[in-house]
Amino acid sequence: MREVFQTELHEVQSRLVELAQDATRVIEKATNAFNQSNVHLADDAIAIADATANKALALDELVIKILARQSPVARDLRILVSALRISASLERMSALAGHIAAIARYRFPDSAVPAPLRETFVEMGKLDVELGKKVVELLQNTDVDFARQIQAQDARIDELHRHVFDVVLGSDWKENAMYTVDVTLASRYHERFADHVVDISAKVSYLTTGDWNDAE
Amino acid sequence: MREVFQTELHEVQSRLVELAQDATRVIEKATNAFNQSNVHLADDAIAIADATANKALALDELVIKILARQSPVARDLRILVSALRISASLERMSALAGHIAAIARYRFPDSAVPAPLRETFVEMGKLDVELGKKVVELLQNTDVDFARQIQAQDARIDELHRHVFDVVLGSDWKENAMYTVDVTLASRYHERFADHVVDISAKVSYLTTGDWNDAE
């Protein structure tokens, strides 16, 4: 029974890794679509994001089946409940990245990013892609130090998010309302993507440090 | 054992109702704060939203304990897993409503809503409050027809959300970037609030119709 359970947990883990890889592919394509006005990359990103919802649903069904068959307790139970939450976060990450691609698509062939914010969005996108890759690695290795390190990286995204507002609300901003709307939403989506990464890292480190063991 | 389980399920249900009542109180205060530039209501809304996160966490802990003690299967298991997801949605609803209050607070004593969009935001806020109240009722009574009816109401919020963009991107829009940013984000928060209501209703009707019974 224990061996079957371990195999099943392994399956859950590799599906979470796959969802994280999807979210990373979506944000990578979306941020390039957004910064380079590339409509093909935008379409790719949106297609992967759409497929992620079903994968997340299938994973949740698997977790529910394992809960029913194995009736796990203590740490095993918490791992499975965490898997449900992590899958919800990964699905949202793909959706948020898909929204960034949708803005690029909508403005094509124009750019959605005006000159004064181009560098900022390139950096934001790069950071989100890095965070996506780190989540993939974290879900493969569940290392608590690595999880804490990821949580610290979110600070720079928050800084860039605030910078977008400083620029938009500054006296030098002469762009039209369309640009203002696009960069406001795009910045929010980038920031929420990183928030979910922090949530996932917090869950993994919580499980790994074993604090949860005492709670049941 | 069954009787204990029913009592525990009841406790989960009443805590979900409480979270839904909180989310409704937050959106009610937030939308009034936003539309009437009332900083006291904004502070109230933010305080309730902050407290909701801990209540949701406590509810999740309770659900995990019940899962561990009772090892439920089939429909009972699905109800508990759904409770975890519904609590996550209710927590996000309070957070989103809190963000609306934060915009009002930030702009005080000025208004965050320019004249051309005042009516739109009053209607959006009213609809979100109504949806919040309906979620409270739905979680108390779990009626499938009522759940479906709620899902249909989200369409009007989406319409208003699009209307905000039409106004902002129209040639008559002469407001500064600050207003553009505020109404873009506020409209998004109102719309996401309603999205979560739809998610919750879908989960309740799925559980109530018994489709889930066949899946395990």
Image (cartoon, coloured by chain):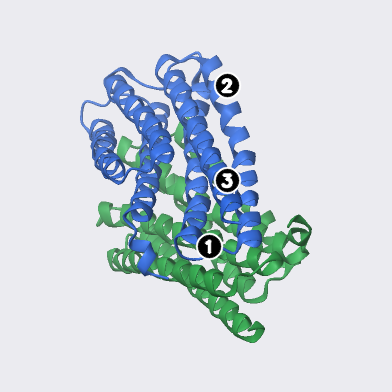
Chain colours: A blue, B green
Question: Does residue A137 appear in this view?
Answer: yes
Give the structural element (helix, strand or loop) at label 2.
helix
Looking at the image, do the residues carrying marks 3 and 2 touch, with CB atoms under 8 Å apart? no
Residue most toward the left? A171
Relative to A40, is A120 above or below?
below
Check disc 3: other Cα within 10 Å, few if <14, some if 14-19, many if 20+. few
Of circles 1 and 3, the one toward us is 3
Instruction: Residue at 36% x, 54% y: name it.
Output: B99
Check disc 2: other Cα within 10 Å, few if <14, some if 14-19, many if 20+. some
Of B59 and B1, which appears nearest the observer? B1
Looking at the image, do the residues carrying marks 1 and 3 touch, with CB atoms under 8 Å apart? no
Q: Which residue is mark 2?
A: A43
- Residue A16 picture location, percent across and down: 51, 41
Q: Give amino acid for label 2.
A: Asp
Q: Give amino acid for label 3.
A: Thr
Q: Which residue is mark 1?
A: B84
Protein chain holding label 2: A
Protein chain holding label 3: A
Q: Quadrant of residue A143?
A: top left
Sequence-first tag of 3 and 2: 3
Of A140 and A34, which appears nearest the observer? A140
- Residue A14 picture location, percent across and down: 53, 38
Looking at the image, do the residues carrying marks 2 and 1 touch, with CB atoms under 8 Å apart? no
Protein chain holding label 1: B
Q: Which residue is mark 3?
A: A7
Q: Is residue B122 left or right of residue A154?
A: right
Relative to A133, is B145 above or below?
below
Q: Is residue B130 left or right of residue B40?
A: right
Question: Does residue B125 appear in this view?
Answer: no
Give the structural element (helix, strand or loop) at label 1.
helix
Residue most toward the bottom? B3
